[in-house]
């Protein structure tokens, strides 16, 4: 049944103050697997990302990385252990150039320029002047040079032009090839669904259906979004 899960949430309950949002979420991602976490607005997808990255504590349940219980680890410690949240986890410095941004993360940006020529062409431009899609590529670029073990991407295609979305997902595909465990969160089930190996539908703070992408058809999608899966 393939490799063991590298990263998992076990029966996670979490929320904000008195507001319970996650009501027992289970999900698992293996090395070289893309898991798409889908669901309507307010289902709890972003909250799941926050718990996974260590930005929000759990009320109950566990977060496991490579067999180690990291539930109590803060975000920076999880990041050092290879759990990367994109894009918010690593925003760009708007006042620095593309090249300067890359050099804050990498000794040598050359491999990035080889892989993402449009960043090479814009290396002298302030990151704040890039399009949203180019900024997205810039935040993902270091992952191509030093792949994380787990990459969590919250709405990576939100607000991006289709061509850039394609490039962003090419980066994800390459990271999958290299063994990264990817958790992609999307409200609209488009690019993430195409790339996914496994799909998890969320609704009202629960993972209501988990299965292989091949089992997701139009009827399943409609049912999941209407809450009758
Ligand atoms: P969206 O696509 O709208 O971000 P989502 O599936 O990612 O949806 P969450 O953002 O996790 O859902 O939100 C789930 C619930 O938690 C919503 O009811 C939302 O109002 C609530 N919520 C989110 N953030 C906070 C917060 N900081 N404080 C209080 N409630 C919050």
Image (tube, rainbow, N blue to C red):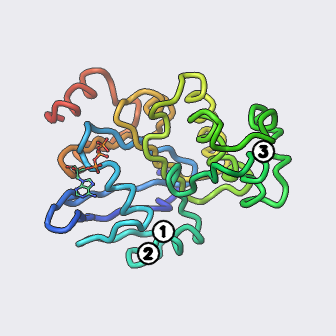
Q: Residue furthest front?
A: 95
Q: Nearer the viewer, mark 2 or mark 3?
A: 3
Horizontal and vertical percent for residue 22? 22, 58
Indicate left or right for 217 with 87 as reference. Answer: left
* Residue at mark 2: 70
Horizontal and vertical percent for residue 198? 42, 41
Q: On residue 86, which mark appears?
A: none
Indicate left or right for 27 with 97 as reference. Answer: left
Which quadrant of the figure contains the C terminus? top left
Indicate left or right for 49 with 13 as reference. Answer: right
Which circle's residue, 1 or 2, is located before the other in the chain? Answer: 1
- How many numbered marks are there? 3
Q: Residues within 10 Å of mark 3 (few under 14, many from 20)?
A: many
Which circle's residue, 3 or 1, is located before the other in the chain? Answer: 1
Q: Residue at x 17, y 47 (%)?
A: 204
Horizontal and vertical percent for residue 92? 62, 51
Q: Residue at x 60, y 33 (%)?
A: 131
Disc 1 + disc 2, Cβ < 8 Å: yes
Q: Residues within 10 Å of mark 1 (few under 14, many from 20)?
A: many
The one of 89 and 95 positioned closer to us in this rendering? 95
Horizontal and vertical percent for residue 41? 26, 39
* Residue at mark 3: 112
SS at circle 2: loop
Q: Quadrant of residue 158?
A: top left
* Residue at mark 1: 65
């Amino acid at each position: 049944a393939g490799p063991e899960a590298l990263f998992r949430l076990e029966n996670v309950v979490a929320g904000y103050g008195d507001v319970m949002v996650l009501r027992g979420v289970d999900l698992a991602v293996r090395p070289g697997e893309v898991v798409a976490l889908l669901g309507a607005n307010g289902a709890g997808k972003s909250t799941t990302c926050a718990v996974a990255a260590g930005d929000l504590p759990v009320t109950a349940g566990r977060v496991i990385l490579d067999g180690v219980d990291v539930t109590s680890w803060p975000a920076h410690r999880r990041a050092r252990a290879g759990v990367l949240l994109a894009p918010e986890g690593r925003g760009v410095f708007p006042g620095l150039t593309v090249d300067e941004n890359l050099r804050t993360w990498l000794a040598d940006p050359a491999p990035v320029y080889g892989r993402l020529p449009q960043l090479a062409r814009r290396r002298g431009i302030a990151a704040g002047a890039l399009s949203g899609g180019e900024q997205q590529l810039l935040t993902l670029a270091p992952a191509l040079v030093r792949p994380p073990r787990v990459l969590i991407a919250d709405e990576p295609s939100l607000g991006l032009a289709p061509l850039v979305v394609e490039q962003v997902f090419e980066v994800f595909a390459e990271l999958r090839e290299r063994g990264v465990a990817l958790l992609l969160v999307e409200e609209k089930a488009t690019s993430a669904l195409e790339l996914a190996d496994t799909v998890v539908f969320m609704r009202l703070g629960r993972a209501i259906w988990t299965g292989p992408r091949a089992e997701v058809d139009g009827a399943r999608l409609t049912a999941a979004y209407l809450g009758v899966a």
